Amino acid sequence: MVKFIPFIKLQPIINIDHEGRKEKMLNNVGKTLAGLALCVISSAALAQDISNDKVDVIIENGFVFDGTGAPWTKTDVAVKGDRIKAIGNLKDMSAERRIDATGLYVSPGFIDPHTHAGDGLVKAELGGAEPLLAQGLTTVVVNPDGGGGSAGTDTVNIADQRQKLLSHGVGVNVAQLVPHGMVRRLVMGDVDEHASEEQLDKMRELVRKGMQDGAFGLSSGLFYVPGSFADISEIVELGKVVGEFGGLYTSHIRDESDYSIGLIPSVDEVIKVAREAKIPGVVTHVKALGPRVWGFSEAVTQRIEQARADGVEMWADQYPYEASKTGLSSALIPRWAMAGGTSKMLENLKDTAALDKMRPEIETNLERRGGAERIQLANFSPDTSLEGKLLSEISESRGKSPVDTTIELLIEAKGQIGIVSFNMLTSDVVSFMNKPWRMTSSDGDLVPMGEGVPHPRVYGTFPRMIAKYSRDDNLVPLATAIHSMTGLPATVHRMKDRGFLMTNMYADITIFDLKEVKDMATFTEPHQLAKGMKYVFVNGKLAVDEANYKDIRKGRVLNRNGEDFVRE
């Protein structure tokens, strides 16, 4: 009698260190499938191999996705310590616990390649990461967008951020990026100038230190101050430093609409960095923002696919929503008025001459985003009753134009207002979704439950990708959706031994009920945890058990250069 043991013989070929190209890996999978006869071993030999090796957990009878994009296989998965011990028919293997996954889907733990959760995870009260685990997430990549216009510079110090994360423990694994905007601010401030060679050398040193400390690459936010003041040659030079460590470059591009150089030239900038620095490039939260560029998804696709055809490693990530989130000032205030930082911007907002120049530009930026009725306040500390209201509603209630209301609100809040902006076309969102180079990401924060009216992606991104776009709308095959949030981001970021369900990989595992998966968060009531994730393992330990959250904090800070960092 013989039995087929899936995956075990595939593992040496698929479980590469992710230094190779994704296409090469998938080609190897295809070649291996032609020789599946090699995977047949006797049941007696199997019993001999496993009978004396008791494991911690066996997940039985689940529909198992391996993370490569291949269809599911009905099989068992054994976990011992922090690794996957075996995959196959494991009914004769001894285990401390057996989980019956009949009717459930078993997947590698989800990976979010673009999240602002780092600001929350460093806080003891949020470090358990319940909203992330409720989505099936086991790993997040932090410090995106070059720092995203944040006023702080602490994320430049990768080792310091790592220590803050580990001091109280984290519920998920964390991979760090070096944020270009914060590096530039530390060296140059918020001035609208190109870097001198001396300043560039200082930035090189900071980026090199971050990479030496384990960062996975460089992020930029060329839409935001101070990144918007940088010439692309500056990014190329810093990208070359990242290339010394095998890292990547990910960018909130300079213009997702037609604010400055335009959407397509901004995508070309990422391609230029990837080509000249010889590193992977990622157009992060890819979109066509506003009516002026609706329909441009095909042109973006052509640019990325042509670059890939030319041998440039280009990728993108995307959140499955038609609305974005940013700051009101970043969305509407011209960059010249923001040079010098928030304090200078506030001076300009009170200066008659500056306002005369600024008002028509604010009006134009409102048009770019589809008007005041498409902008919703996410947080407004002077008056929380305005949170969740549209700018058009607030303008009407105050009896003022949207432009004057914008100026007034920014002065009242000292420049700090978050907004949700409904600015995308459904067809563009869907157009990007099935691309083989597209990862699922959230671009979400991690905030205290009930604070403000954040974008629902904070709580619902990954279940929404599965429930709406795969199960309900049938626009993306489930295996493709799973690949976009597991094996693909692991490969793009060169995460060693994560992102796939194969023997000897880390036991980051998500088990969900496809019928029950649902993103509960809405734009008006976002503070609702997702449903449907029954079990979530982080490094072999159950952080969600029978749909119940456990604050065990077994996440690690991942190290691009070697062994991961673990809380002592």
Image (spheres, rainbow, N blue to C red):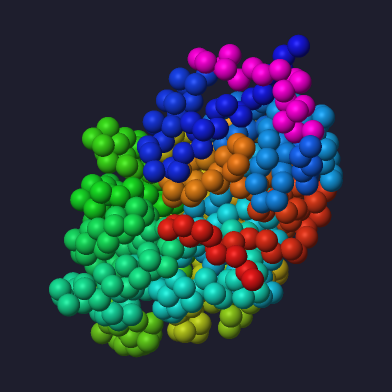
Q: Is residue 84 visible?
A: yes
Taking 337 as reference, is 393 left or right? Answer: right
Q: Is residue 490 above or below residue 127?
A: above
Quadrant including the C terminus: bottom right
What residue span does the magenta drawing correspond to? 34-51
Q: Is residue 373 visible?
A: no
- Residue toward you, 466 or 365: 466
Q: Quadrant of residue 334?
A: bottom left
Q: Quadrant of residue 170?
A: bottom right
Please tell me whether the stretch drawn in magenta is mainly helix, strand or loop: helix
- Residue toward you, 213 or 521: 213
- Residue toward you, 541 or 306: 541
Residue 276 in percent (x, y) is at: 20, 50
Residue 266 in percent (x, y) is at: 28, 52
Q: Residue furthest left?
A: 197
Taking 263 as reference, is 393 left or right? Answer: right
Q: Is residue 498 above or below residue 305?
A: below
Please tell me which residue is depicted at 45% across the width and 43% down the height of the picture. 17
Taking 488 as reference, is 90 left or right? Answer: right
Please tell me which residue is depicted at 75% across the width and 20% down the height of the picture. 43
